[in-house]
Amino acid sequence: MKTYKFTSVIWKEKEGYVSKCPELGVASAGDTVEEALKNLKEAVELYLENAKELGMLEEIDEIGTAERFTSLLEVAVA
């Protein structure tokens, strides 16, 4: 079993939280941050299983094993 590491971004909306994996373009949601993250993990697992069935998992290997650095970028506009 291969382990991949992806980025998860979660933000608050009016009716809960949206979660997204920007590397794969996969998104989900939940009523709490924890639920949104759990749902995103499940959606990414399904995405990867489907990619494997379609013979496309090798294309994702490079994305899921690359080293990443994330930071919050704050920008002010006058």
Image (cartoon, rainbow, N blue to C red):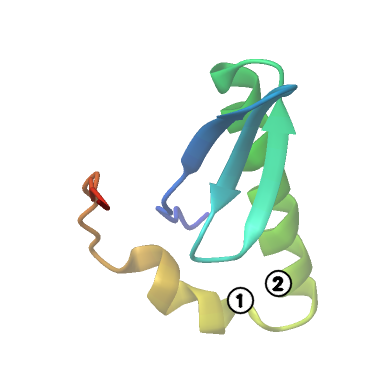
| Observer-nearest of 22 and 68 | 22
| Observer-nearest of 6 and 70 | 70
* Image: 76 above or below 10: below
Q: Quadrant of residue 4?
A: bottom left
Label 1 element class = helix
Q: Quadrant of residue 56?
A: bottom right
Query: What amino acid does circle 2 point to?
Result: Lys
Residue 3 is situated, as x and y percent measured from the top left of the image, at 45, 53
* Image: 32 above or below 66: above
* Image: 65 above or below 39: below
Residue 36 is situated, as x and y percent measured from the top left of the image, at 63, 28
Residue 66 is situated, as x and y percent measured from the top left of the image, at 29, 69
Label 2 element class = helix
At 70% from the left and 24% from the top, the residue drawn is 14
* Image: 3 above or below 16: below
Residue 77 is situated, as x and y percent measured from the top left of the image, at 27, 53
Q: Determine the residue located farthest toward the front in the rendered image.
A: 78
Q: In the displayed structure, does residue 63 sit left or right of residue 15?
A: left
Query: Can you identify the residue that label 1 sits on?
Result: 57
Q: In the displayed structure, does residue 76 sit left or right of residue 8?
A: left
| Observer-nearest of 14 and 10 | 14
CB atoms of marks 2 and 1 within 8 Å: yes
At 71% from the left and 72% from the top, the residue drawn is 51
Query: What amino acid does circle 1 point to?
Result: Leu
Q: In the displayed structure, does residue 16 sit left or right of residue 68?
A: right
Query: Can you identify the residue that label 2 sits on?
Result: 52
Of the image marks 2 and 1, the number of the one nearer the N terminus? 2
| Observer-nearest of 29 and 76 | 76
Q: In the displayed structure, does residue 34 sit left or right of residue 75?
A: right
